[in-house]
Image (cartoon, grey):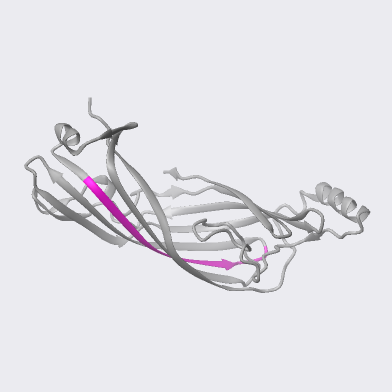
Amino acid sequence: MTRSIRYLFFGLIVGSFGIVCALPLSEAALLDGLMGGVEESLAKRAEEKGERLVIGNFYQAERPDSHAPIGVMQDHTHNKGEFMFTYRYMQMFMDQNRDGTNNLSTSDVLNAYVIAPLQMTTQKHIFSAMYGLNDTVTLMAMLPYVMKSMDLENRAGTKFITNASGFGDTKLAALWRLYAFETPSLGAHRFHLNTGISLPTGDIHPTDNTPLGNNSLLPYPMRLGSGTVDLLPGLTYTGVYNDVTWGFQALGTVRL
């Protein structure tokens, strides 16, 4: 039976920056009408405390926690006409082979396969843009430039390096603001729906020169994209109270 070989890996976001243009707050959300009962209850509680329930987006540009950490994608919506451009750089280094949870030496791998991977580095330059189409829907586009390098060794003891680079899969998304409210005693709470699609623009047939010959097809981990059209559903919630911010996000990938 063929054994599955896996990499033990870890990643590091090493640098990023973003530019945002902010416009005034708005009061539109997808569930405004459906949340009438909840809104009335919250407003009554706020009134009893001498407060006022405010419906809006509540992203304050002067707060460093107005957006999630740079590695979290699609964490916030924008108001109508607001736009944002972002650049992210990511580097991931992987080494050590495993069969399930058991560590394998290079000789162990070569007993089953003619070539063993030794280590692999992946770098990504990720460019993205967001735009508030209206007060409910925010559009997003993202395109990564991917560079992969893998060190290998064959049964003859020859060590060599393969490389693949190019643009990865293009992601297009729409973020639907479901509901957002704020009171001084409860803080601010925001919910939005993530909907997106990934287009297979990344190369799934990368080649490089190897001991097997020039322009040899590289293995699966060296692919720059998934090769499929993928649906990207998700749900995001964030909360703010005074100087504390928290959130939750669930994202999925459905291969079509």
Identify which residue is drawn at 46% across, 67% down: 16
Asked if 130 appears above or below 91 in the picture, the reply is below
Residue 176 in the image: state x and y as whole percent: 62, 56
- Residue 1 in the image: state x and y as whole percent: 22, 24
* Between 237 and 140, the one nearer to me in the picture: 237
**Which residue does the image show at 14% across and 45% down from the upper left?**
153
Q: State the residue in front, 251 or 141.
A: 251
- Placement of the C terminus among the 4 image quadrants: top left
Question: Taken as a whole, is the magenta stretch helix, strand or loop?
Answer: strand
In the displayed structure, does residue 152 sit left or right of residue 200? left
Q: Is residue 149 left or right of residue 13?
A: left
The quadrant in which residue 55 appears is bottom right
Q: Quadrant of residue 181?
A: bottom right
**Residue 19 percent across, percent down from the top left:** 53, 73
In magenta stretch: residue 120:
yes
Up-down relation of residue 131 to residue 157 (above or below): below
Segment tinted magenta in the rendering:
118-135
Quadrant in the picture for residue 143: bottom left
Can residue 87 be seen in this snapshot? no
Q: Does residue 19 show up?
A: yes
Q: Is residue 139 above or below residue 119?
A: below
